[in-house]
């Protein structure tokens, strides 16, 4: 087992069979070895720094019906909201004062926010906070739309591929959505010049270990700047409510593998990890992650942006989450830094 982990660190890739073997035969000991190597590799590029991203969940309206997601349009129990441009800017102001230098605008696929509106929001944020990076996470759009947001000042785009297997993709999404459409979007985003984040859920319904290997190989090929992976957690208003959600251990293992596969990649320790385990985010960092994404959304809408059950931090002010995370990171020996947190392409001198 260890020799495969060493091989992955050296070559930054394994064969499909080798990845399968590692995943299927993992033990707590091999996982610990993997995490040790992942931390060492992360240290080379990022030292003990943890990058912050301020997440602004600006709409929970969605025209799609992804079967896993709590804000799918068919969920009649979801209480829908949209933030105004002024509210979004207010979140940015709070965030700036708290030391955030990057904002992630995330929302459902909400036709109310036309390209024009999105562009205006991007421009205003950039005008007020020219030293901050803007990340969009608003789903599948045309090349032209992506290009217009980029030209307006958006820097990064998060679009998880969710699963790299066609058949599995079709079991998680209605027929209007396809893996090929998703891949086209990721290709367009890269071509336009965005820093791209992709990723997948671990333990989503019907997922096999082989699917996870396909996800790893897809990520390797895409070579994104960021990889967001988190455990699937069921939402009570979805058809996936009965599926189990205890996928933390496997998620951590995936984080470690991805760190070795793309040494300088930006890897968030996600809220979903923190939801299934009170120390999930710490464990994510100790498995090789280097980013946390605290919530900057106004408190009165937080309990409405529920993609899954029991989401943490829905009652806390942005400042509380900021200092909570700083303390948590400190306790495990890492420092939250005030920075745009761009991807580093060179190892730190002396490492
Ligand atoms: N459990 C975990 N993650 C989820 N997401 C959506 N629904 C769930 C769920 N039930 C993830 C998807 C999406 C991201 C914003 O949240 O991967 O891309
Ligand atoms: Fe939100 Fe700890 S990060 S309360």
Image: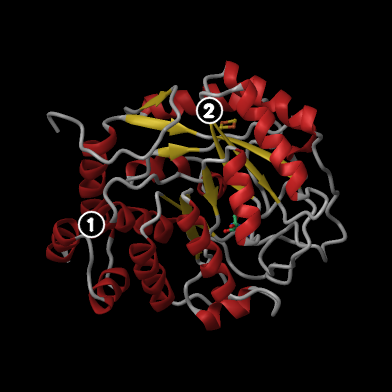
Residue 74, percent from left and from top: 83, 66
Q: Is residue 65 left or right of residue 10?
A: right
The 10 Å Cα crowd at callout 1, few under 14, some 14 to 19, many 20 or more, is few
Q: Is residue 265 left or right of residue 276?
A: left
How far apart marks 1 and 2 lie (CA) works out to: 41 Å
Q: Quadrant of the N terminus?
A: bottom left
Q: Is residue 60 above or below residue 1?
A: above
Q: What's the residue at 66%, 66% (across, down)?
A: 68
Q: Is residue 199 above or below residue 165?
A: above
Residue 132 - label: 2
Q: Quadrant of the C terminus?
A: top left
- Asked where in the image residue 56 lies, by quadrant, the reply is top right
Q: Furthest-bottom residue in view?
A: 167
Residue 197, percent from left and from top: 47, 52
Secondary-structure class at tag 2:
loop
- Asked where in the image residue 72 lies, by quadrant, the reply is bottom right
User: Quadrant for ligand 1?
Assistant: bottom right
Residue 219, percent from left and from top: 38, 63
**Residue 161 seen in render:** yes
Q: Is residue 302 left or right of residue 264?
A: right
Identify the residue position indicated by label 1 in the image. Answer: 29
């Amino acid at each position: 087992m260890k020799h495969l982990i060493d091989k992955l660190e050296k070559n930054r890739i394994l064969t499909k069979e080798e990845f399968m073997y590692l995943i299927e035969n993992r033990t707590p000991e091999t996982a610990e070895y993997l995490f040790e190597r992942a931390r060492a590799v992360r240290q080379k590029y990022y030292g003990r720094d943890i990058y912050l991203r301020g997440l602004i969940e600006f709409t929970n309206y969605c025209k799609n019906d992804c079967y896993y997601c709590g804000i799918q349009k068919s969920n009649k129990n979801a209480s829908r909201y949209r933030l105004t441009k002024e509210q979004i800017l207010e979140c940015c102001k709070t965030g700036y004062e708290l030391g955030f230098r990057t904002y992630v605008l995330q929302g459902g696929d909400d036709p109310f926010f036309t390209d024009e509106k999105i562009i205006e929001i991007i421009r205003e944020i950039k005008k007020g906070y020219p030293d901050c990076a803007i990340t969009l996470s608003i789903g599948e759009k045309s090349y032209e739309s992506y290009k217009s947001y980029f030209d307006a000042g958006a820097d990064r785009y998060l679009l998880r591929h969710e699963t790299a297997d066609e058949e599995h993709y079709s079991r998680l999404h209605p027929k209007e959505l396809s893996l090929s459409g998703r891949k086209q979007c990721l290709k367009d985003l890269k071509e336009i010049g965005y820093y791209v984040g992709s990723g997948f859920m671990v333990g989503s319904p019907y997922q096999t270990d082989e699917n996870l290997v396909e996800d790893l190989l897809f990520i390797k090929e895409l070579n994104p700047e960021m990889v967001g992976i988190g455990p699937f957690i069921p939402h009570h208003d979805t058809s996936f409510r009965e599926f189990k959600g205890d996928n933390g251990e496997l998620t951590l293992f995936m984080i470690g593998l991805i760190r070795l596969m793309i040494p300088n990649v930006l890897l968030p320790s996600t809220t979903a990890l923190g939801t299934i385990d009170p120390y999930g985010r710490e464990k994510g960092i100790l498995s090789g992650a280097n980013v946390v994404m605290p919530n900057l959304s106004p408190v009165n809408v937080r309990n409405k942006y529920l993609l899954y059950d029991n989401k943490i931090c829905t009652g806390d002010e942005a400042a509380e989450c900021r200092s909570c995370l700083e303390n948590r990171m400190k306790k495990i020996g890492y420092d939250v830094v005030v920075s745009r947190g761009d991807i580093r392409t060179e190892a730190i001198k002396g490492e």
